[in-house]
Image: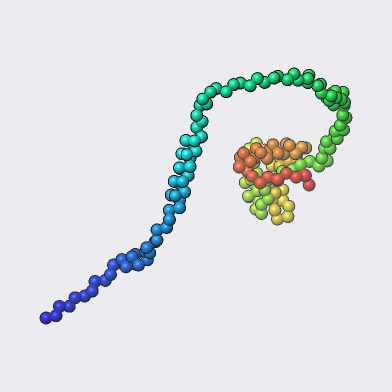
């Protein structure tokens, strides 16, 4: 009787690993040679760089001290000139703006959104107005005589996370 045997399937990657590897040719070790030469050079430098004590002490040379003339006084007279000089500067007066400032914190299509922002501003202790301009409802604070006052209140609103307020002249 003939015995039937079947071939076992080859394992995946078993043949590929060996076939892809190439035998790399070992080259000359340039880096190792360079490091070795550098190390030997440093050792030789330190061996020969150390000075041996001289057999006889050296004699000190006598140095003649030269007498220097007195230091001349500086001839700068600009210091005295600057002390006596006066410069007149014309400082222009600051012009006060003729228009007061306003701060707009929002512009909404719906009145309930504008009233909601007005309430948030009121919780910060500030008074605002809702003005209808066309289809928009604007939330306005002011008028302010100086821009600094408007800036101060804008910073107060920013600390309360109410951002986007713009300052411009009242219209």
Image point 34% across, 64% down: which residue? 17
Image point 68% across, 50% down: which residue? 107
65 on left or right of 95: left
Which colour scheme appears in the figure? rainbow
122 on left or right of 10: right
Position in image of residue 54 (x %, y %): 52, 26
In the image, residue 137 sits, relative to residue 48, either above or below, namely below
Q: Is residue 82 visible?
A: no
Position in image of residue 61 (x %, y %): 63, 21
Q: Quadrant of residue 75?
A: top right
Position in image of residue 30 (x %, y %): 45, 53
Q: 151 or 45: nearer the eye?
A: 45
Q: Is residue 54 visible?
A: yes
In the image, residue 62 sits, relative to residue 94, either above or below, namely above
Extreme residue toward the front, this view: 56
Image point 86% across, 31% down: which residue? 89
Q: 94 or 10: nearer the eye?
A: 10
């Amino acid at each position: 009787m003939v015995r039937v045997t079947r071939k076992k399937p080859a394992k995946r990657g078993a043949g590929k690993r060996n076939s892809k590897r190439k035998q790399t040719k070992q080259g000359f070790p340039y880096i190792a040679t360079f490091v070795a030469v550098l190390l030997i050079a440093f050792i030789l430098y330190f061996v020969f760089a150390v000075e041996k004590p001289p057999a006889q002490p050296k004699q000190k040379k006598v140095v003649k001290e030269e007498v220097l003339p007195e230091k001349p006084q500086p001839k700068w007279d600009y210091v005295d000139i600057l002390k006596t000089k006066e410069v007149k500067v014309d400082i222009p007066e600051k012009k006060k703006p003729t228009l007061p400032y306003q701060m707009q914190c929002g512009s909404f299509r719906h009145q309930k959104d504008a009233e909601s922002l007005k309430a948030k501003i009121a919780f910060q202790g500030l008074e605002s107005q809702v003005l209808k301009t066309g289809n928009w409802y604007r939330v306005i604070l002011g008028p302010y005589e100086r821009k600094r006052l408007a800036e101060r209140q804008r910073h107060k609103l920013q600390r309360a996370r109410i951002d986007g307020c713009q300052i411009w002249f009242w219209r």
